[in-house]
Image: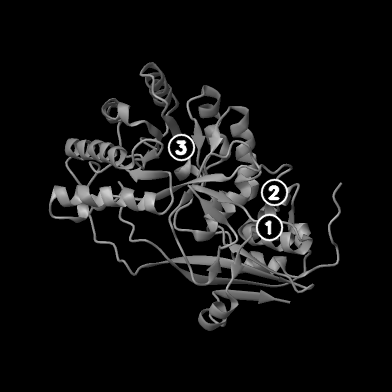
Amino acid sequence: MQHYPTDIKITKVEQSTVEVDRPAIGCNSGAREIMQPDPNAKWKERIIRIHTSDGTLGWGAASWGTATPEAAQGAVNQNPFDLLRPDEGVVEEFRGLENALWDVIGRILGKPAYQLIGDEAYDAPLRAYDSTIYFNDLLYDTKAEGLKRIENDVKSSLANGFVACKMKLGRGNHLMERKAGLNRDIELVRLARSTAGEGFNILVDANNAYTYDEVITFLNETGDCDVFWIEEMFDEDVELYRNLKDFIQEKGLKTLIADGETRTRDPLEFYDAFFEAGVIDVIQHDMKGLGVTGWRRLAEKASAHDVQCAPHNWGSLLGFYLSLQFGKTIPHFLYGEVATLTSDAIDTSAYGFTEGHFTVPDTPGLGLELNQEVYEARYAGKEDWQVAE
């Protein structure tokens, strides 16, 4: 049995909101109108900072809705290893603090988080895809201008070093007439393939906007485009997925079926029937929302059915790097999701990126650092809340 320090206590917990720069991301199939994205817009990244009696300061992304001052108050004067034991995971009461706790205990022990998260670490660089190709073609007055924009978006993805991108589908859900929207989706996937050439993976995501028949039409019309995966094309249904899986196999396609993003808050058992039927190839619960403890359980379920893992990450700089720490501990990690976010307050330089692959640093904790000068100038004294001894 692993023995951890018993004489360290949490002295203060605080939540701050830092600004994150983002690309001018457009809308997806849920939008009912097209709007020009604000190029100066910022994401708001909520971070939890945990101070301990030995002088350690650990921090990480706040988990969805569960990082509260009440939970934090309950953590004060407790040993961080009583709240999160690496071999067991986080105590449910403190789930909102989990991401920061992994950083704290890693820094205390002088180990990278991945060595604590998993029993084994895998050496292969971790693949990641560019997830920023939205409905930018609809921002222009003419179709030709719109097509050129998507072509340039794909070229930008290539120029930024990616060898895979994800394209949003579902223009016919609200923003175009239904058949015209489907045809535009197909045309743009074909354009992306001709622009990127071979050796570049194209992933597509409809956010549940398609019908089953529309998916079949899409696959028939893009069969020569080698679409890598189709994600959340319609609402989850075991029998429809079984039919879809049969169609993909009969047509001789290699396209994978991915799902799970919108079910992050549901019990993990929701997907048992899909796993057992063998109709899902990739599971995608949100990394920050489910957390490492939840993802370890989900990954175990997935492994038993030869399902690969590609944690969803949207609007979070920190969630992506957390997924890399976790991904290094499982052999069936498929992809991380990148939204090309940056922040002058958050230093990610310890992570390497080459030809669409990331490497995870061996620095203690989550491998990220806060720029203290920036933090002190812009955020110190403006915390969302603080609790202390």
Q: Which mark is residue 102?
A: 1
| Residue located beneath label 2 in the image | 117
Q: Position of residue 192 (x, y in %)?
A: 30, 41
What is the CA distance from the residue labelled 2 to the residue labelled 1?
A: 8 Å
| Residue 252 vertical position relative to residue 18 in the rendered view, above or below | above
Q: Secondary structure at mark 2?
A: helix
| Residue 213 vertical position relative to residue 129 in the rendered view, above or below | above
Residue at image x 28%, y 38%? 194
* Label 2 packing within 10 angstroms: few (<14), some (14-19), many (20+): many
Instruction: Report the side of 103 relative to 27 (left or right).
Output: right
- Depth check, front residue: 93 or 79: 79
Going by the numbered disc 1, the residue's amino acid type is Trp
Q: Which mark is residue 346?
A: none
Residue at image x 84%, y 61%? 5
* Label 3 packing within 10 angstroms: few (<14), some (14-19), many (20+): many
Going by the numbered disc 2, the residue's amino acid type is Ile
* Label 1 packing within 10 angstroms: few (<14), some (14-19), many (20+): many
Q: Secondary structure at mark 3?
A: strand
Labels 3, 2: front one: 2
Q: Upstream in the sequence, badge 2 or badge 1?
A: 1
Q: Position of residue 64 (x, y in %)?
A: 53, 57
What is the CA distance from the residue labelled 3 to the residue labelled 1?
A: 27 Å
| Residue located beneath label 3 in the image | 259
Residue at image x 63%, y 60%? 367
Q: Position of residue 36 (x, y in %)?
A: 24, 61
| Residue 16 vertical position relative to residue 273 in the rendered view, above or below | below
Image quadrant assignment for residue 50: bottom right
Q: Colour mode?
A: one colour
